[in-house]
Image (cartoon, helix red, strand yellow):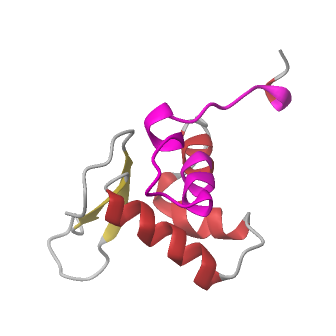
Amino acid sequence: MNDNHSLCPISKSVAQDKNLSLKAKGLYWLIENYIESPTFDSSHLKPVLMANCKESSVAFDSAWKELKQAGYLIQHRIPPSNGGNKGFHYEYELTDTSGGAE
């Protein structure tokens, strides 16, 4: 099958989670799709995703927050490597099971 027409499945636990909105499930799928690409730069995850959505930043942030609160999207704050307190960045972990808010 051509890569442009390949299927990108979503975790069954996410798809069947009745506590997640369709908006959050769609964002989960989009995140998973981008993360799996070998050429994707994960240090710019959120801006890249937002640029590829027609929803407003409010709608996007709502789904983003929903995934974080449900424990499907875990955000790690990474300190700068030079020991300063500026320049930290975030790394994200996408899980296929709900872990609740951390």
Q: Position of residue 65 (x, y in %)?
A: 43, 71
Q: Position of residue 43 (x, y in %)?
A: 46, 59
| The quarter of the displayed image where residue 78 is located | bottom left
Q: Write down the region rendered in magenta.
A: 4-29
- Magenta includes 16? yes
- Magenta includes 6? yes
Residue situated furthest front in the rendering: 18
Q: Is residue 76 above or below residue 58?
A: above
| The quarter of the displayed image where residue 33 is located | top right
**In which quadrant will I find the N terminus?**
top right
What residue is shown at x 53% (from left), y 77% (from top)?
A: 61
What residue is shown at x 62% (from left), y 31% (from top)?
A: 9
What residue is shown at x 56% (from left), y 50% (from top)?
A: 31
Q: Position of residue 15 (x, y in %)?
A: 54, 41
Q: Nearer the viewer, residue 18 or 7?
A: 18
Residue 65 visible? The answer is yes
| The quarter of the displayed image where residue 50 is located | bottom right
Q: Is residue 74 above or below residue 34?
A: below
Residue situated furthest left in the rendering: 83
Q: Position of residue 35 (x, y in %)?
A: 53, 43
Left or right, 52 with reference to 34: right
Q: Nearer the viewer, residue 33 or 24?
A: 24
Q: Nearer the viewer, residue 77 or 13?
A: 13
Left or right, 87 with reference to 79: right
Residue 90 visible? The answer is no
All told, the count of numbered labels is 0
What residue is shown at x 34% (from left), y 69% (from top)?
A: 89
**In which quadrant will I find the C terminus?**
bottom left
Residue situated furthest top in the rendering: 1
Q: Nearer the viewer, residue 50 or 15?
A: 15
Q: Is residue 82 above or below residue 42?
A: below
